[in-house]
Image (cartoon, grey):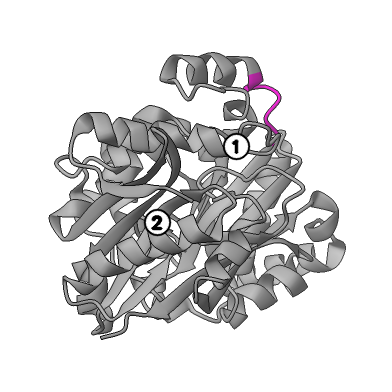
Amino acid sequence: MNFSITPVTDKAGKMKFIKSQWLFYKNDKNWVPPLISDRLKTLDTEKNPFYKHSQIQLFLAWSNNEIIGRIAAIINDNHNKTHNDKVGFFGFFECIDNQEVANALFDTAEKWLKERGMNIMRGPINPSMNDEIALLIDGFDSPPVMMMTYNPKYYIPLHENAGLHKVKDVYAYLLTPEGYQTDKIKRFQKIIKERHNVTIRQLNLKDKVQLQKDITTIKEIYNAAWMPNWGFVKWTSEEFDFIAADLKQIADPRVALIAESNGKIAGFGLALPNINEALIYNKNGSMLGAIWHMMIAKKKMNFVRIIALGLMPEFKGSGIDAILYWEIGDRGTKAGYTNGEASWVLEDNEPMNRGLTTTMNANVYKTYRVYEREIKE
């Protein structure tokens, strides 16, 4: 096949890179178009604080003046400092069903990373572990929830035939009221609550001073609780504030909770309304269209994503995480949410996987995979 790959060097090229995604999902009923403004914000190397410690280069594959693929090569200096390695990342991958084109895209990203001293290429990561990650490998029968990835099935062999191998799987669990609203679970969480004198409060989105305190608290818990996890890199204050500004626009305080034990902060659980239930109809990715569809679908959205749940290290093993899951489920049901997704969870995060399956009776319904390959000398 006659094609070429070129780097994106200007704003016009960046917009072509973003909008090219529509070319690969024309007839896919489960694809949720991203907001163009969100993608521009994510890839803005001047305003997104991620790029204060990271680099990115976008590439487009062309044939007969048509885009047939894209990829980004990414270096996250904070990741490499944290884990003492030289891992480069690829992300935002899209491609026609052609192994030759896919190979060339991966090779191009690898070459860019190699020239900057990296010895491993890992992905898809869009653009960091704190954003969208991994390739969907199982669970193609329903749309993704907010901030989770989606791709055609043929992307799996495109990755694996290019010499990329599994480094880690992550799971998405489906939560239903029938699963966790059992007498046994209700009694269990009540016992834990009394044992540790636990109180639960929701975020106050209207009190700006208290909200900022809570956001700071959540950042501290997140950075402490996730530290042992594979691939984790601490948020900088600027990065956390950057994403918090967006998330609080859609947050529902009824399912955004902080747990305290004897008056001391113990943990938090954050679930967000699945705005993808509205955005799936916003075919052109415009902000105006998103607002319109959100207004129409607001009362019909009945799905939440538990995007983060963690405890301070001293409360690990206390069972307070089970209380947070219960409270999100119970309060979410009362608020009109009928189902939820807990994601993503590392395949080897035994406490979290065990808690979801045994405590909440949840089932894995989507699996995602992070790949890597060695960058040869």
Going by the image, does 140 lie left or right of 296? Answer: right
In the image, residue 75 lies at what x, y percent? 24, 65
Residue 41, quarter of the rendered image: top left
Q: Name the residue under label 1.
A: 25
Asked whether residue 20 is drawn in magenta, I would say: no
Please determine whether, in this image, residue 150 is positioned above or below residue 273.
below
**Most foreground residue, 46 or 185:** 46
In the image, residue 291 lies at what x, y percent? 49, 17
The C terminus: image quadrant: bottom left
Q: Mark 2 points at which residue?
A: 91
Please determine whether, in this image, residue 91 is positioned above or below residue 61.
below
Going by the image, does 304 lie left or right of 167? Answer: right
Residue 136, quarter of the rendered image: bottom right
SS at mark 1 in the image: loop
Residue 138, quarter of the rendered image: bottom right
Q: Report the Cα–Cα distance between label 1 and label 2.
A: 17 Å
